[in-house]
Amino acid sequence: MTAEPTDERWAALRRRFTEIDGDGDGYITHAEFREHFPELPGEAIGALDQAGDADGDGRISFEEFVRLTPFG
């Protein structure tokens, strides 16, 4: 059985996603990650693509973001 986030956690995830999604298009791009996490090395962004970009489009959707985020 897979743990599901609570309503409160869903709201927190949505707020954080929206903060990072600077242009509001519903996706987080590499540039938006770099803007919000300037200390993040390029290798980490590549790892995010491998771990989270399920459709391979170079962007992270909200659904992909949720899968990358622990619910604890």
Image: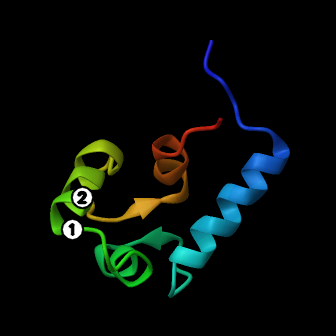
Q: Residue 64 in the image: x percent, y percent?
A: 46, 49
Q: Residue 44 carries which label?
A: 2
> Colour scheme in the image?
rainbow
Q: Residue furthest left?
A: 43
Q: What element carries label 1?
A: loop
Instruction: Determine the CA span between mark 2 and mark 1.
Output: 5 Å
**Residue ID at (66%, 24%):** 3
Q: Is mark 2 on a helix, strand or loop?
A: helix
| Residue 54 vs residue 52, the one in the foreground | 52
Neighbour tally class for label 1: few under 14, some 14-19, many 20 plus, Cα within 10 Å: few
**Residue ID at (63%, 37%):** 71
Amino acid on which disc 2 is placed: Ala
Taking the image as shown, residue 69 lies to the left or right of residue 28, namely: right
* Residue bearing mark 1: 41
| Residue 32 vs residue 27, the one in the foreground | 32
- Tag 2 and tag 1, C-beta contact below 8 Å: yes
Neighbour tally class for label 2: few under 14, some 14-19, many 20 plus, Cα within 10 Å: few
Q: Residue 44 in the image: x percent, y percent?
A: 24, 58
User: Would you identify the image quadrant in which residue 59 lies?
Assistant: bottom left
Q: Residue 66 in the image: x percent, y percent?
A: 55, 47
